[in-house]
Amino acid sequence: MWVDQTVDIKGRKPVRGIGGGYSIGRQRLLDILSRRATELGVRIEYNSEIDPGRDFSGSDVVVESSGVGSRLRRQRANEFNTKIVQGRNKYAWLGTTRVFNSFEFAFVPTEAGWIWFHAYGFEQGTSTLIVECTPETWAGLGFENLPAEESLARLEEIFAEHLDGHKLLAQIRDDRLPWLNFLEVTNGTWYSKNVVLLGDAAHTTHFSIGSGTRLAIQDSIALAKSLHNEPDVPSAFRAYQAERKQALIRPQKDARLSSRWYEQIARYTHLEPPQFSTLMLGRRSPLVAMLPPRIYCQLDGLTKKVSILRTMRSMAGDLYRKSPRSNLNAVPPTNRADA
C-alpha cells in the first residue's frame, strides 16, 4: 500500500498531494489467478505457442489477451479495424531496490533537458520506476547508443538524490535498455467470429494513469457475465463490447490528456513547485491544456474555496469526458500510425 503523492522538482521543496493505492507484483498476481483457475478445473498449458494464423473454428470462444503486441490482432488488424497512435516521449519501465512508500514523481533538469520518473513500491524490497523524457532529451543524453549497463549507470547518476544509494533494475535484451514509445491501441470492433479481444490487446491507456491491469480484469468480468447471460456467443460478444467501450470513454480521455501533459512538459517546468504540482495533479482536466498555466492555477484555487464553482467545474469535466465527440486536440496531437 502506498500513501500520498510526492512531486519533487530538483532543487526545490517537494510538494505532497493527497492520494493512496495498492500495488502487487505481476508474478504474484499471476500465481494467485492461475491457482484459482486450477482449483476451478481449468487446464493451463505453458510454453505452447499459438499460431495467430491458425483456424480456430473448432473452439467455442478464443480470448486474445496477450497485450499491446498481440500477434493475432496484428495479423487480423483489418478484421478488428485496429488503429495505433504512437506517443512522442521515450520511456523505460524499470525497477529499483528502493521502496517508495508514496507515489513519487521526480523531475530533474539535465544539460539535454528535463527527465523524470514515476515510482511506487509494489512488494517488499522493490519498487516500479518508470523513466520518461522527450525524444530530444533522450537523444541529447546519448541513450540511443549507450549499452544497457552504461544507461543504467547514467540514470542512477541523474536520480542519485532520489535513489539514495539504491540500484536500478531492468530486463535487458541485446545489451540495450528497453526504451519504448507508448502505443495507444484502439479497435473498431473487439471480436471477429469466435475470437474476442481483452485488455491491452483491445485497448491501451497511458501508464501515467495506472489503469491497465484494472481495466483488463474489468474486461474479463464483463466478458464472463455476458457469456453467462446471453443466449449465444455472438450476442455475448456484442453485449461485452458495448458495455466495455462505454466504460472506457472516461479513462481513455484521461489517459490522452495525461500523456499529452508530459509531452508538453516545457510548458510547466518554469513554474514554482506548488503551481507545477497543481498542474501535474490536475493534468486529466481539459482546462489544463486550454488555459495559460498561471490562469489555471488561479481558477483551481478559486474552485477550492467556492463550492458552487467546484461543482460546476466537476460537472463540466464529467460532461467532457463522457462525450464521445469532445475535442482532444487542445494541444498538438501525437504522431499517428495505422496498424
Image (cartoon, rainbow, N blue to C red):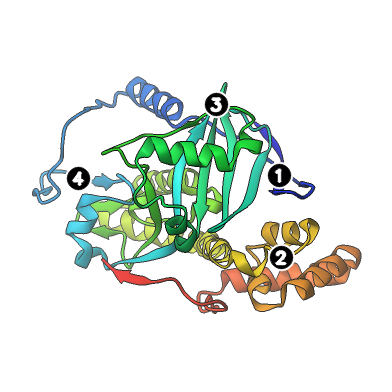
Going by the numbered disc 4, the residue's amino acid type is: Asp
Q: Which residue is mark 1?
A: 5
Q: Residue at x 40, y 24 (%)?
A: 31
Q: Does residue 110 appear to the left or right of 40 in the view shown?
A: right
Label 3 or label 2, whichever comes before in sequence order: 3
Q: Is residue 100 above or below residue 215?
A: above
Marks 3 & 1, CB-CB < 8 Å contact: no
Question: Mark 2 or mark 1, which is nearer to you?
Answer: 2
State the CA–CA distance, disc 4 to disc 1: 46 Å
> Where's the C terminus, which quadrant?
bottom left
Q: Residue at x 64, y 33 (%)?
A: 100
Label 2 or label 1, whichever comes before in sequence order: 1
State the CA–CA distance, disc 2 to disc 1: 21 Å
Q: Which residue is mark 3?
A: 97
State the CA–CA distance, disc 3 to disc 1: 19 Å
Q: Which residue is mark 4?
A: 60
